[in-house]
Structure formats: C-alpha cells, structure tokens
Amino acid sequence: MNVDPKRNLPDQPERCTDFSQLLLAWDNALPGRGLPWAHESDPYRVWVSEIMLQQTQAKTVIPYFERFIERFPAIIDLADAPLDEVLRLWTGLGYYSRARNLHKAARQVVDQYAGIFPRSFAEVFALPGVGRSTAGAICALAFGVPTPILDGNAKRVYARYFGIDDEKESARMRRLWRVAEACTAKTECQKYTQLIMDLGATVCTPRNPACNNCPVSSGCYASEHGATHMLPRKGQRLQRKTKSTAMVMVRNRNGEVLLERRPAAGIWGGLWSFPEFDGTLENLADEFGQRYQLEITLDEEWEELSHEFTHFRLKIKPLLARVAEKTSGNLTRPDIAFISIDSPFDRGMPVPVAELIDRLQAIPINPEH
C-alpha cells in the first residue's frame, strides 16, 4: 500500500484539532480499562507501570505490578532493596534490563533528587531505561504536562487515522512524532493520554479493529479506504533462529543445587541460573573441574525443553549431575552458590530454571552420596 503523500500530511493543523476534539469527546464506558495504575497521579506508580508495559501486554503486567508495589510502595523502598530481590519479583515478566534500569534509576532519584521524582521532561528522560514515549507518559499522566506519547497503541491509531505509510521507518517515526506533538491536548493532556492508550487497546486493535465503535472513525484514512489491516506498516519480519544449550543441574549430598549469576549483558541478565555447557558429554566433568574445582558425575539426561524469546527459540537440554562426596569446590565467588530447593529462593531466576527446580524436588538424592 502506498498512501498519497499529500492526502494526510500531519502538519495540517485542522486534522490534528479534529482528532483531538473527537477523542476527548469519546464517552468511554471504562476509562483506564480498570487497570490498577490507571488515573494515577503518583509519578512513581506511573513510572513503574510504564516500564512494565514496555513490550508486555497489560493483562500480563497486572499481577506483577500489584506484587511490586506491595513490596516497594515508594521509590525509596525500591532504591534500598537489593537487586536480587527486584529481579526475583520480575521473574517471568521478561526483558530483565528493565528491572535493572528501574532499580538503578530509583537509586539515582534518591541520590540526585532526595527521593522526589523529577518533574521536568528532560530530567525524566535522562533516567536509565526511560525513552521518549515513556517520559512523555509519566509527565502527562503524573504532572499534567502536555508531552506526547508514541507507544504501540498510539502509534497504531495515528498511523491509521493520518494514513502514515512512509517506506522508511525513520521517516514514518518523524511523521508520527509530529502528529503526536500536534494532537496532544494542551489543557486536558492527562485525559487525552489515557484515552489514546485506551482507544488503541480496546477499539483500534492490531487485528479486527472495531471501527463502528471508534470515536475518530469519521476522519480516519484507514477506515475510509479499507486499509486498517495494512496500517501501520510492518517492518520486515526476521526469521526466528533456534539456539541450543545444556543446563547442568549439579546437586550436592544435601540436595542443594549449584546456581550462578548470569552476566548483566545478554539474556536473563543478572538472574541466577544453572551453569550452561556447550561441549560434549565426555568433557563435562573436566570442564566443571576447571571451572568450579568440583568433581561431578552425570546421572541423567532429561528430555529437551524449549523457551521462546522475541527473536529466537532456545532449546535446553537438562543434565542432572552430582558432586563427589569428598569434593568441596571453589565456591568463594559471590556469583556462584549451592542453594536449597526446599525453601523459597530470594533471588531472580529464569522461568525454565524455576520449572526445572520444581521437578528436582520430586527426585531423591542419588544413594551414592
């Protein structure tokens, strides 16, 4: 689809005015969709919800948000907490760099602003993990500052209404931001920001949008031209690759399992996981001897399991091993430890690791211990 470039230029102020007026007049039966963070004026709660909502559906976020706020009701509580506890509460929500940046930013707010969340767009935008749209949402929803947003919902609404279909993504984004800036209400920005998110989430949905119930359909280019299924333009889909690894579940004679903290960069950054092994089984014992000064014996190979990431699929081969009785190993490093699987783990771990630990609880210790 190629939209007429002169048809719906976003610098036509009357179209932006029409859009804003139509949206603000929308009689939404459930503004905020009943979400626990809707209509919040506390910038801390708005910030936490916006970070959690990045690349994650609202229905998935709800229980995480509620648990997180219950444990960290104020920004100083988050700043004072150990990162391990923050990651534990984030386990299963994915994109763990968001949690690390949230924790880092909380400490920055405490150190630089005495624990009072900054009010200016520039200061909010400068916080770790806060992008332009997230900063705009925080300023609009918490402080009533007319700053535009361009999350997935708003982007879809604007692209369809104004017929924005530039071939190059950079050009599309420039036009979308121009639209967002021109359309954002100056005096009712909190209401406007909430409504455009609601519109994209409940009416102008990615598939089968409810155009008959849309408050802005009378001026919508995509609705008029039957092009809702073609807008917004989708980027080129990357072929999802498959990666493979083995996770080694090493137990000692007390039934504890060996975990190590993953590097901050990469998948599951900062979480505690089973050691991974990519060599041949014949070299397993030698490598563990070198890596941890542990003498281990392989007991079982479990059936392979899969874990889906956004851009690839990870195939995991679980290997159950045990530590020789007289070996103590070099476990003085802070990033490795034997932990009990019979008590709650107070650190973050990937979902597949938690699932494997649940399975381990039903397996008795090898009698050779």
Image (tube, rainbow, N blue to C red):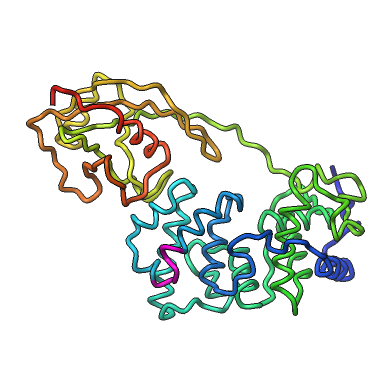
User: Residue 229 in the image: x percent, y percent?
Assistant: 81, 42
Image point (55%, 53%), residue name: 61
User: Residue 99 in the image: x percent, y percent?
Assistant: 44, 57
Q: Quadrant of residue 181?
A: bottom right
Q: Is residue 152 above or below residue 360?
A: below
* Total numbered circles: 0
Decide which of 318, 59 is in the foreground and name it.
Answer: 59
Query: On the rendered image, what quadrant is the C terminus found in?
Result: top left
User: Residue 319 in the image: x percent, y percent?
Assistant: 31, 25
User: Residue 323 in the image: x percent, y percent?
Assistant: 16, 30
Q: Is residue 245 left or right of residue 168?
A: left
Q: Quadrant of residue 14?
A: bottom right
Decide which of 282, 137 is in the foreground and name it.
Answer: 137
> Which residues make up the magenta segment?
70-76
Q: Is residue 312 left or right of residue 349?
A: right
Q: Is residue 174 magenta?
A: no
Image point (39%, 36%), residue name: 355
Decide which of 3, 301 is in the foreground and name it.
Answer: 301
Q: Is residue 75 magenta?
A: yes
Q: Is residue 15 left or right of residue 71?
A: right
Image point (70%, 60%), residue name: 197
User: Which residue is situated farthest in the top direction here?
Assistant: 282
Query: On the rendered image, what quadrant is the N terminus found in?
Result: top right
Q: Is residue 53 left or right of residue 236?
A: left
User: Which residue is situated farthest in the left direction here?
Assistant: 326
Image point (80%, 54%), residue name: 164
Decide which of 155, 138 is in the foreground and name it.
Answer: 138
